[in-house]
Image (cartoon, rainbow, N blue to C red):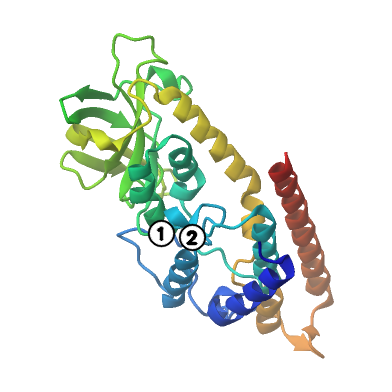
Amino acid sequence: MQNLEEFRKEVKEWLNDNCPQSMRAGADPSIPVDEVWGGRKAEYKNPESKLWLDRMGAKGWTMPTVSKEYGGGGLRAEEVSILNQEMFAIGAKGPLLSFGIWMLAPVLLEYGTEEQKKEHLPKIIKGEIRWCQGYSEPGSGSDLASLATKAEDNGDHFIVNGQKVWTSYADKADWIFALVRTGPKEPKHDGISFLLIDMETLGVSTKPITLISGKSPFCETFFDDVKVPKENLIGQQNAGWAIAKALLQHERAFLSSFGLASSMGSGRDLVSIAKKHIGEESGKISNGFYRSQITAHKIKEHAFGLTLKRAKDEGWKS
């Protein structure tokens, strides 16, 4: 087992050699900032965003605790803590935003077959496939178990018909993980299955939901006689409700730790930006008011990050 101090040294050296300058605190504010979701349709305003994703994905460090067998980093919790600390130290930007990482991957690890893990996890970790979530429907939001999208058993495949709503970024996603009704005669919680569907399959379509602002991440998603192979079923048929609940738990865990990811560094240093636009005197922000406000903000940001880190560490130990 590798010594933790040796591992820390290796991480420092690797980040120094591989994290592009525009992905670190203090980056030139004129360089475009990307929200990196990956996937087949991804476009990058800053090429170094893709470079950073590729390098971190190749190391498996977008999901560092996942086994190397599935494309992850294979790190212990203590090593992940060190990786987070060293990324925080240089203000490294998170390489990837991903529903695949936050929600689907943990479900695959728990319920997926070996073939499903080896097929999907490496692509999630490298950001090659962008996922969206197909849970809510027009008539089943708060009462999710009443969903009506049905998947009829047709031998070696299902035929899916129905509609999902509020599917975030469905128009940009490559695949969707969806709850479908495969047991119409069973009690509503018992007739649900968890299915993976390629968004390029014939019969899948999306329609953006425009909010009052004129923009929205949400879409309606329609399935019209969509043919889905049986190997895309996760877990047992009609036993998807347990998987759905597990995924929602992982989603809540992600939301609770999202601030830690953001505090790891946005790739933009507020102090450098202020010096550029407000002015600089003797190495300091020239305006005293803004200097004190930014200092207070940085202290709170750091304290918040440490609090979330402690909560996460305690979770690992429990």
- Circle 1 residue: 127
Report, in whole angstroms, how far the alpha carbon at label 1 lies from the one at label 2.
Answer: 7 Å
Tell which of 175 and 316 is nearer to you: 316
Using the image, determine if residue 302 lies above or below residue 241.
below
Binning the other alpha carbons within 10 Å of mark 2 as few (below 14), some (14 to 19) or many (20 upward) gives many
| Quadrant in the picture for the N terminus | bottom right
165 sits left or right of 243 in the view: left
Is residue 137 left or right of 13 when viewed as pictured? Answer: left
In front here: 258 or 316?
A: 316
Q: Nearer the viewer, residue 110 or 50?
A: 110
Horizontal placement of 21 versus 51: left or right?
Answer: right
Task: Tell me whether circle 1 and circle 2 mark residues in contact (CB < 8 Å).
Answer: yes
User: The disc labelled 2 sits on which kind of residue?
Assistant: Leu
Give percent across and percent down for residue 75. 59, 58
Q: Residue at x 44, y 25 (%)?
A: 141
Sequence-wise, which precedes: disc 1 or disc 2?
2
Say the numbered circle drawn on residue 14.
Answer: none
In the rendered image, is residue 100 in sight?
A: yes
Determine the residue positioned at 73% across, 56% down: 305
- Mark 2 sits on what residue? 96
- Residue 116 at what x, y percent from top left? 34, 43
